[in-house]
Image: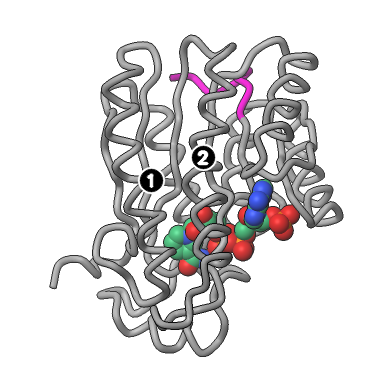
Amino acid sequence: MELAGKVALVTGSARGIGRAIAAALARKGANVVINYAHSESEARKTEEMCRSYGVETLVIKADVSKRDEVRRMIDEIIGKFGRIDIIINNAGILGKSKNPIDVTDEEWDAVMNVNLKGAFIVIQEALRYMKKGKIVNIASIAGKDGGTVGPHYAASKGGLIAMTFNLARHLAPDILVNAVAPGPVDTDMINDELREKLRPLSLTGEIAKPEEIAHAVIFLLENDHITGEVVDVNGGRLMD
Ligand SMILES: NC(=O)c1ccc[n+]([C@@H]2O[C@H](COP(=O)([O-])OP(=O)(O)OC[C@H]3O[C@@H](n4cnc5c(N)ncnc54)[C@H](OP(=O)(O)O)[C@@H]3O)[C@@H](O)[C@H]2O)c1
């Protein structure tokens, strides 16, 4: 798919991987909707980066776990652009606890509601208008091998992968649905301790840069014969 002139929503694009995806889309000429929940000034910085490529942008505050906010966001996108062609479900939270015994009901629900239900709500609300296009869900290596963080995070990302497969079947051939499953990426999500612990686990001996994840997203968007696929970007960690 040619990306120039398309309208792309990137959830959670104020910072980190979402920002890199938004910038990569803008570099390809797509008009970008930048979504955030808390970080307005960071979202404005992402917008500036995108605008430097000469595309149109829209910044929208919406918590993806709340249906009324997502519905309003989608309606605002349609109001401005009249269409939506690309959804990147990137918004995500890690949760505080790693040890299963420490995970409270509230923490479980918060992680599932943003990472899994939020992605579904965004897709469902967008499908009121989106009849053709591409969806990419940002999963995680934790959704495939359990990861090194909490069980709720792993479950949310495993669920996101399963949902990707399901929606790929339901929405083909008009909408292609794929996922990217990163290993650790250098963003605010991982602290220095985790970064140093995880670095040696990849065959590249490195933590990924957000731009490497954005690159995989662009590949999936530009290719018109891949659906129901999960692209691993983890420095070869799943080979062992
Ligand atoms: N970093 C990694 O090692 C890694 C590895 C594998 C997968 N991932 C996945 O990659 C995605 C991006 O992670 P990241 O590393 O870029 O994390 P990050 O730097 O912490 O950024 C998370 C982004 O999600 C947004 N967000 C959080 N809750 C939201 C909500 N309820 N509604 C809308 N936006 C929300 C945040 O916006 P606000 O600041 O406005 O809340 C922020 O822009 C996540 O899905 C994450 O699970 C990350």
Asked which secondary structure carries label 1, the reply is helix
Q: CA distance from mark 1 to mark 2?
A: 8 Å
Quarter of the image for the C terminus: give it.
bottom left
Quadrant housing residue 221 = top left
Q: Closer to the camera, 103 or 93?
A: 103
Q: Which mark is residue 140?
A: none
Q: Position of residue 175 (x, y in %)?
A: 40, 18
Q: Position of residue 217 (x, y in %)?
A: 44, 41
Q: Position of residue 129 (x, y in %)?
A: 59, 11
Q: Is residue 26 above or below residue 203?
A: above
Location of mark 1 (residue): 160
Location of mark 2 (residue): 119
Among the two numbered marks 1 and 2 on one chain, the one whose residue lies closer to the N terminus: 2
Kindly check if marks 1 and 2 are in contact, taking CB atoms under 8 A apart as contact.
yes
Q: Position of residue 231 (x, y in %)?
A: 30, 47
Please tell me how crowded label 2 is: few (under 14), some (14-19), or many (20+) other residues with Cα within 10 Å.
many
Residue type highlighted by circle 1: Leu
The answer to whether residue 16 shows anywhere in this view is no
Q: Is residue 102 above or below residue 51?
A: below
Please tell me how crowded label 1 is: few (under 14), some (14-19), or many (20+) other residues with Cα within 10 Å.
many
Quarter of the image for the N terminus: give it.
top left
- Residue 9 on the magenta span: no
The answer to whether residue 33 shows anywhere in this view is yes
The chief SS type of the magenta part is: loop
Left-right relation of 199 to 7: left
Q: Residue at x 70, y 33 (%)?
A: 33
Residue type highlighted by circle 2: Ala
Q: Residue at x 80, y 37 (%)?
A: 59
Question: What range is drawn magenta here?
Answer: 1-8
Cβ of disc 1 within 8 Å of ligand 1? Answer: no
Q: Residue at x 74, y 28 (%)?
A: 55
